Structure formats: C-alpha cells, structure tokens
C-alpha cells in the first residue's frame, strides 16, 4: 500500500505546489548558453521524491546485477533489461546533481525514449523473452528424467539439468531448433515433429528410454508447446532380459531332468541335453566326448555337425597327449574358452572344421573325477563368455548323471544276465556243481547239509567241516520273515521249486544278500530224496540298485527344486515387489483375454487409472519411505475393496490400473469415489507432522469408449489427467468433448 500511496501523494504535491511551495516553485526562464530553459526552486518533497525514485531504480538494478552470478537460462534477458534500466538511472542522477550538459534541462523523458528503442530492438532482433519460463521449477530441474520443452514453432524453450548434462546443452540452446541437437537425439524430435502426445520406447546410444510427449496447455486449454520426457529404462530392460535367460535355463534343465528320469535310452538323453544347451547357449555345433579305457577320446553324440558338413571321422583318434586343450581340461578340471581358434597354437584345425572360430569346453565330472568334455563350437570370433560357461556347468553335471546312470544300468544288467546264465547252467549240469560260480547246498529230506561246493565256503566262510551235518539255518538272520521259510518248505515238500531272496550272515557275522533257488531231487521212482539249493550272493547288485535309487532320488529332488524355482520366477515375473500387485507383464498377458471374454458374453469392462497426487513432492518432503507407505496402503485398500474377478496392476511409478469386469463407467465412478474418500483418511505420522495424500482417477469403459486395451488405458489415463487439471482429488469419466476443450 505504501508503494501505491506515495506516487499519488507526489502527484498531489506537484499540482498544488503553488500554494505550499513543497515541490517546485518560483519558475523562471533562463538561458543555458544558447538554450533557453525553465528553472524552478525545489522544495523538500521534491528531494524526497528524487531520493525515492532513485532508491527504486537502484534496488531493481541491484536485483538484476545479483542474478548475473547464477548464469541461468535467462541471463541474456537479464543483461538487456539491466542495460535498458541503466540509461534513465544515470540521466536522473546527472540531472538531480546538475551535471547535465545543458544546466537545468531534464533529460529523463529523452532517456526513456532511448530505453524503449533498446527494448524494441531486443524483442524484434535479439530474441528477448523467447525463453518463456515454461515448466521451470525445482521439481523439473531435479528430475532424473531428461526433459526438453519446445514451443509451437518447434524451437527449444526449456530443458532441465539432466537433459543439459546428457546432451551438453547450454543457455545458447534456448530458441534453437531441435535439429541442432546431436544425433540421434535430433532424429527423435524430427520423427515426432507433428506428434502432440504419445508414449513409446526409443533406443539412443545404447540406452533404452521411455519417451513421453505431452502438450503444454495454458489456462484456456490452448497448446503453447510440447514437453519431451525421456525416462531411462535400460536397467529395467536388462533385468527383464536376465529373468528371461534364467527362465529359459530353468526350463531347459527341467526338460533334461525329466528325460533322465523317464528313459534309459542313453542316446535320447544326450540328444535332449545338447538340444537344451543350444537353447541356453547359442551354438553352431556341439558334442559330448568321454575318455575311453585306452586314453582315446570317444565322441558319444553330435549336434549341428550335419548343417556344417563336418566330417565326424576327422574327430576320431584324439588323445590327451595329442590334444593340448583336452589335456588342459582334464589336468585342471576347469572350463576352457578359446576366443580365436586360428590364433591359439593349441588348437588343432581339421579340414572340414576350419569354419570354427571360437570354442568353449566344460569338464564332465563323475565322483569328482573328469571323465569327459562338453564341447561347443561357433563360427563367430570371441563369441563365448564366462556367462556361457557358467550356464554350461549344470548341463555338464546332467551329462555326468546320464553317464553314471548308463554305467550302473549296464553293470546291473550284466550281473543279472550272468545270474540267469548261471542258473541255466546249473540246471543243465547238475552233476558239475563243483565248478559252479554259485553256492551249492544239497540236504537230505530233513534239511541237514550233506554237500557244499567251494563257492559256498568262499561266500559264507563256513568250511566243509563246519557245514556238514548242520542245517542251512546257520546262515539265518532275523531280517528274513518266518513266513518266507514256511512258504519255502511248503513248496519243496510238495515237489515244487522255490525261489527267493534271503538276508543271511556269514561265519564272521557279516550280512549279505542272497538269491536262492531250492528244488527237490527225485529218484527214478519220482520220490524226493534230497533238496538242491543254488545260492548267489547279490550284494553287489543290491548296492548298485540302492545307488541307482539314490541317484534317482537326487534327480527327483533337483527336479522339485527346479520346479519350485520356476514357480518363484513366474510369481516374481508378474508381481510388483513393493505393493504385491500385478505388474505390466501380467497386464500384457491378461488384458486381451479379459476383453475377449467381455466381447463373447457382451458385458462392459471399466478401466480405472489411479495416480497419487503430488507424489514427487511427497517423496521429496517426507522421504521415499513415505511414498512407499502410501503406495502400499493404496494397494492394500484396492485389494481389500475389489472383487475376486477384478484385477489390480501397478502400471508404473505411482500409477495403478484397475480392470473391473461387468461394471459400467457410472458404477465404477461410485466405487472409485469410495476408494478416493478412504485414501484421503490415511495418515502417516512423522516427526515433522502427519503426511496425507489424495488420488486422481480416470475411467474409460469397454466398448463405449474404445474396444482395444491400449486405447482404453490411454483414455483412462487422459481422464485421470483431466481430473488433475480440474484440481486433483477427484474422479473423471472419459469424455472426448472435455478432452478437446
């Protein structure tokens, strides 16, 4: 009020000075050289007025000069304003103190003409005020995203600190066209020269950005320019790629584990392993080689060699002495990577394999011993990395399990075959039991031993003298059920043959497994005179079976662990870790399915886009924990107040999307208003005070507003921004007419 009242007071004093002589009075015409001037005596209020005006000019001048040190985007504007103001200030000081060339002549009106001429030139030719302070505030300048604003003529009018650093911009860039930006940034602006609003991903200089183009509207909803916002999502893309790799690896390992458990066909298992290796580690060709008994590498299975016309015959005959690479793998037990085979002196070039330019080898271990190598070939120099080798380790372990399973199976099969051959031999050569590899016992009809062969003594430790006259019960343990003995006697006393398994003990008390065949010996009259028992120690087979069973159990445990890991990865892939809501990946999987069902059954679907108001300010003021609190509370609120069929997603940042089936936009409006009111009541008590927030919500309806999920999301998002533009903390149903205005 003082600044407004003083000029009015000075005017009154100036026009009434003839009565009180407090301003200027006693006007006289005098000559200053050859120039006539009117001079007057100056009263006390005139000097007060002069001091007042001079103080105002000096204060404004000081403010402008002080701003020079910040070197802002508006430095040029400040300089022009300062120079223009300096002219009348200097002229006024010279006039007041009588230092003008023509004594008594007031040059102030003339100086304002000079100042006006300077400002007109600056506006028309010096681009003064081209850099209007659009979107210039602390929020924009502290954004990590790159922000560049252009006016309706396509000229740069603003940018934040992140964009200035990334693109090496300077204040002189203001008013310049985006074509002056470095490539490929300039091309992005060129491609979107006519785009008023969009959201897409662009790749620039190895970084992936989420580009958002938004119009700049004045209070009358007239477009004044556009904002280009670049959000660097490179890290998120890398995490998604890594999750995809881990999922492929888990699936490949699961398939090979299933093959190990479902078939005994050795070659089928190796084929499955090499095929899945190709899914995880790109290869042109691969093979599995084991070290044979004679020290020669034996190639068990090949993959991809037919396409490259590699002669498998040329791969035969390699030994550890002739192949330094194989020797290195066997000696160190560590994988080997050769970036360039033609530059490695240890590499042996075969004529049909000259195309191989990089190579990786992973040792195959069985019981901590290297028994073979998993080999990978590529036609690209420097193709294989440590990551590839790391992924190979699990497959090499599966090859080892397959090799061990094959060995155990072959051993068990061989031993069973030997037993059958021995039993058949005993039937044919019943009189030649002395040379039998099986234990032979002949007893009388009461069960007393009359004969044992040497094998019996070797197995049990009972000599001829120890066993003759005794009953076979000297071998008996309490681990053989009594019922088995009753079945045995019932079978042989009726003239039949009995076969079974015993757990017996030797003379030294050591237990062993024994397969026994007992049959009666008949005389010519067909009467039973003796009983013949053919026994075989099956302990090695039992141990082999137990070992095989343990291996299978281990494989089963591994398969279950892989399945659990897959389930966990699937859940992590579709859930937001902070809120527990579904993420955009799950949205992409479900949105079209929901709309397809709605199309079939002819019911509406409402899309509700929710955004926490002033979320950035909330984070900056109270910390990110406060922002996380409200995000979690909002997610919990929505999960508790939505139906089972409704789907709640964290769409991005502070944005949450809710898809409600069989709900019109009007009903969704009522439901969303309840959410909004409930969210307003949430408080977070902090040392600096209670923190509260609100939400703005936009609603679109299928099929009334759009039929595609992307359009429905876009319209709900636009409706949400209509809610923000209308003052925030409200719910808006999409209306095209409202958006146009």
Image (tube, rainbow, N blue to C red):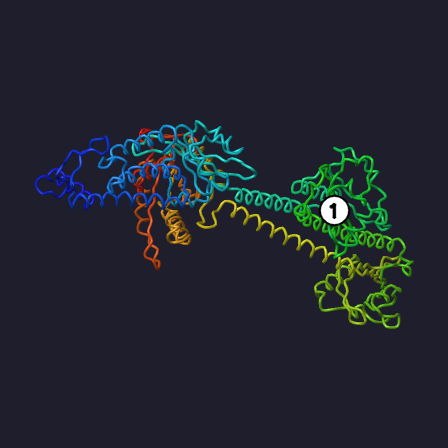
- The x and y percentages for residue 323 are 83, 46
Q: Is residue 369 above or below residue 21?
A: below
Confirm whether residue 635 shows in the render: yes
Q: Is residue 202 left or right of residue 377?
A: left
- Looking at the image, which residue is at 60% across and 52% down? 561
Query: Few, some or many C-alpha atoms within 10 Å of disc 1 (few <14, some 14-19, many ≥20)?
Result: many
- Looking at the image, which residue is at 60% across and 50% down? 562
Task: Name the one closer to the observer, 103 or 473.
Answer: 103
Confirm whether residue 645 shows in the render: no
Task: Name the one closer to the observer, 638 or 450.
Answer: 638
Identify the image quadrant of residue 379.
Answer: top right
- The x and y percentages for residue 384 are 69, 43
State the quadrant of the C terminus: top left
Dot 1 falls on a residue whose secondary structure is strand
- The x and y percentages for residue 447 are 81, 67
State the quadrant of the N terminus: top left
Q: Is residue 213 left or right of residue 522?
A: left
- Looking at the image, which residue is at 81% across and 69% down? 471
Residue to which mark 1 is pinned? 361
Q: Is residue 459 left or right of residue 96?
A: right
Identify the image quadrant of residue 505.
Answer: bottom right
Identify the image quadrant of residue 339.
Answer: top right
């Amino acid at each position: 009020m003082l600044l407004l009242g003083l000029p009015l007071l000075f005017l009154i004093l100036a026009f009434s000075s003839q009565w009180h002589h407090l301003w200027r009075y006693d006007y006289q015409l005098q000559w200053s050289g050859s120039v006539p001037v009117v001079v007057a005596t100056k009263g006390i209020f005139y000097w007060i007025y002069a001091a007042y005006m001079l103080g105002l000019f000096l204060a404004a001048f000081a403010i402008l000069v002080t701003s020079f040190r910040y070197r802002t985007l508006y430095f040029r504007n400040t300089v022009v304003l300062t120079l223009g103001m300096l002219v009348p200030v200097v002229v006024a000081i010279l006039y007041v103190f009588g230092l003008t060339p023509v004594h008594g002549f007031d040059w102030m009106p003339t100086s304002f003409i000079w100042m006006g001429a300077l400002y007109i030139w600056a506006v028309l030719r010096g681009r003064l005020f081209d850099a209007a302070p659009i979107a210039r505030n602390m929020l924009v300048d502290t954004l990590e995203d790159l922000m560049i604003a252009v006016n309706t003529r396509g000229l740069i009018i603003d940018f934040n600190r992140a964009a200035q650093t990334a693109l090496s911009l300077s204040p002189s860039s203001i008013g310049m066209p985006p074509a002056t930006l470095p490539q490929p940034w300039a091309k992005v602006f060129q491609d979107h020269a006519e785009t008023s609003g969009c959201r897409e991903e662009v790749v620039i200089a190895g970084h992936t950005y989420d580009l958002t183009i938004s119009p700049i509207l004045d209070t009358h909803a007239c477009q004044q320019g556009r904002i280009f916002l670049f959000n660097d999502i490179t890290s998120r893309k890398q995490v998604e790629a890594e999750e995809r790799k881990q999922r492929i690896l888990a699936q490949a390992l699961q398939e090979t584990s299933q093959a190990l458990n479902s078939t005994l066909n050795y070659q089928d298992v190796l084929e499955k392993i090499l095929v899945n290796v190709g899914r995880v580690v790109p290869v042109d060709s691969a093979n599995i080689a084991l070290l044979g008994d004679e020290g020669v590498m034996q190639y068990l299975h090949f993959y991809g060699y037919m396409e490259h016309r590699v002669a498998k015959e040329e791969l035969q005959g390699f030994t550890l002495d002739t192949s330094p690479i194989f020797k290195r793998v066997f000696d160190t037990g560590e994988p080997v990577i050769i970036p360039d085979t033609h530059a490695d002196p240890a590499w042996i070039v075969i004529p049909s394999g000259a195309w191989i330019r990089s190579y990786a080898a992973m040792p195959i271990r069985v019981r901590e011993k290297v028994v073979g190598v998993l080999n990978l070939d590529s036609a690209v120099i420097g193709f294989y990395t440590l990551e590839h080798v790391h992924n190979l380790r699990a497959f090499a372990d599966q090859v080892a399990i397959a090799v061990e399973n094959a060995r155990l199976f072959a051993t068990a099969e061989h031993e069973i075959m030997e037993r059958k051959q021995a039993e058949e031999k005993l039937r044919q050569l019943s009189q030649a039991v002395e040379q039998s590899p099986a234990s032979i016992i002949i007893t009388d009809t009461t069960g007393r031993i009359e004969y044992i062969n040497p094998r019996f003594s070797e197995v049990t430790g009972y000599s001829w003298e120890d066993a003759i006259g005794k009953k076979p019960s000297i071998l008996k343990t309490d681990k053989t059920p009594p019922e088995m003995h009753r079945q045995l006697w019932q079978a042989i006393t009726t003239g039949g043959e009995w076969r079974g398994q015993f757990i017996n003990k030797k003379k030294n008390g050591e237990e062993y497994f024994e397969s026994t065949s007992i049959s009666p010996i008949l005389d010519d009259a067909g009467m039973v005179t003796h009983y013949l028992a053919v026994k075989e120690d099956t302990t090695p087979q039992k141990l082999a079976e137990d070992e095989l069973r343990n291996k299978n159990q281990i494989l089963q445990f591994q398969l279950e662990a892989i399945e659990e890991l897959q389930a966990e990865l699937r859940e992590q892939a579709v859930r937001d870790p902070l809120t527990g809501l579904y993420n955009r990946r799950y949205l992409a999987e479900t949105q079209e399915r929901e709309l397809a069902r709605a199309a079939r059954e002819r019911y509406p679907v409402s899309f509700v886009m929710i955004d926490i108001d002033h979320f950035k300010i909330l984070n900056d003021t109270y910390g990110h924990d406060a922002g996380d609190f409200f995000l979690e509370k909002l997610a919990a609120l929505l999960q508790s107040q939505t139906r089972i069929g409704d789907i709640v997603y964290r769409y991005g940042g502070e944005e949450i999307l809710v898809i409600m089936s069989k709900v019109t936009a009007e009903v969704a409006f009522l439901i969303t208003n309840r959410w909004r009111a409930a969210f307003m009541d949430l408080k977070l008590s902090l040392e600096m005070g209670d923190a509260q927030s609100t939400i703005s919500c936009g609603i679109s309806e299928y099929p009334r507003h759009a039929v595609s999920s992307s359009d429905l999301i876009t319209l709900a998002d636009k409706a949400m921004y209509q809610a923000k533009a209308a003052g925030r903390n409200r719910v808006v149903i999409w209306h095209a007419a409202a958006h146009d205005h």
